[in-house]
Image: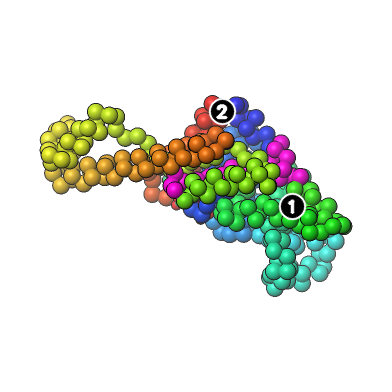
Amino acid sequence: MLVEDFLEPKILIVSGKGGVGKTTVAAALALVAARQGRKVCVAEVDRKGTLAKLLGGKELTYEPSQLLPGIWGMNIIPDRALEEYLQVQYHMRRFSKIFTSTHFVDYITTAGPGLKDILVLGKVWYLEQGRQASGSEGGFDTIILDAPAAGHMLTFLSAPSGLSDAVRVGPIRRQAKWLVEMLRDPKRSRVHLVTLPEEMPVSETLETAAALEGELKIDAGPVFANALYSELFNGPEQVELVRMRAERDHTPLLDEAEKVGLRLDDDDIESLVGYAHFLEARRTIQATHLKQLKKGIDEPVVELPFLFSAGLELPDIETLADVIEQRVEKL
Ligand SMILES: Nc1ncnc2c1ncn2[C@@H]1O[C@H](COP(=O)(O)OP(=O)(O)OP(=O)(O)O)[C@@H](O)[C@H]1O
Ligand SMILES: [Mg+2]
């Protein structure tokens, strides 16, 4: 598949369990889209996350700010989204301060659970339509939403249809319907689930994927299996590794190290061999869960490597974007 076709839906929603790499994948997707010459807005929801740092920019605000060529970042804050909604809908600029005080937002969101989610998705809708009450930047080609963690994600994505069922008439019903239509049109929106190759995240991903396809009727794109250890050794090397460990015979490795000018002693080698065993064991476990994921899911699985760097930065995100591009071309 051409990367350009992969980017057909304007809205890409990235979701998954806490800590699996949603923000990392959202940032990498932003690079993929920007490399295609698209004007990208990548949005986190109501938190000061790591998104801006990954893309080499400063802290994100409600107003989109440019992080990199072609990439803008923003933080969708529900209170601000409500303020904007009231302004656009009822020209309530003058009163909006009262209505959007934290108390008021808390009050109405307690009264109507899911309203915060509606406000966030409503903001995405505004962005998609290229409409904005304030601010300078509009008209994005791609909008990437770094969505709330998966448990919450189902309520998040079902909020509009819940509201549209609950409210029978009037503008709110009409607008909730617009959001449902936006989410259910595969040419407009797609969800990408991210998971780690571990038991709980994989089973949760399978459940979420089934719910997307089932009751939510929202298109799920390729699933990202993140932070995979790559194969370190071939068969004969593994056998040799096991032998060295069993016999505590490190001469072959000491000799190799010496050849490249490394002075290591037996203890160093033992630690290294131990670490290699650990990685191999982890990789085997990951492979089992990855297999489980692939078996249980219809969508293609995009495997992203574990990157050995202390805290991911832009060059790492570039690497992940390269991997995504190569993989998409094979879809
Ligand atoms: N491919 C990778 N290789 C190595 N480290 C990674 C990789 N992907 C993510 N990480 C690290 O894992 C941690 C979690 O990643 P990230 O913040 O993207 O997850 P998240 O799903 O957005 O988390 P949260 O639910 O807290 O928002 C971060 O420290 C990140 O640097
Ligand atoms: Mg995150």
Categorize mark 1 by other alpha carbons within 10 Å: few (<14), some (14-19), many (20+).
many
Residue at the location (35% across, 34% down)? Answer: 231
Residue labelled 2 has its Cβ within 8 Å of some atom of ligand 1:
no
Q: What element carries label 1?
A: helix
Q: What residue type is labelled 2?
A: Leu
**Residue 41 image offset from top left, x and y in percent:** 65, 45
Which of the numbered marks, if any, corresponds to residue 331? Answer: 2
On the question of residue 21 being in view, the answer is no
* The quarter of the displayed image where residue 143 is located: top right
**Separation of residues labelled 2 and 1 (CA atoms):** 31 Å
Q: What element carries label 2?
A: loop
Give the labeled residue for mark 1.
161
Residue closest to the eye, 251 or 156: 156
Q: Is residue 187 magenta?
A: yes
**Residue 184 image offset from top left, x and y in percent:** 72, 43
Residue at the location (65% across, 30% down)? Answer: 5
Location of the N terminus by quadrant is top right
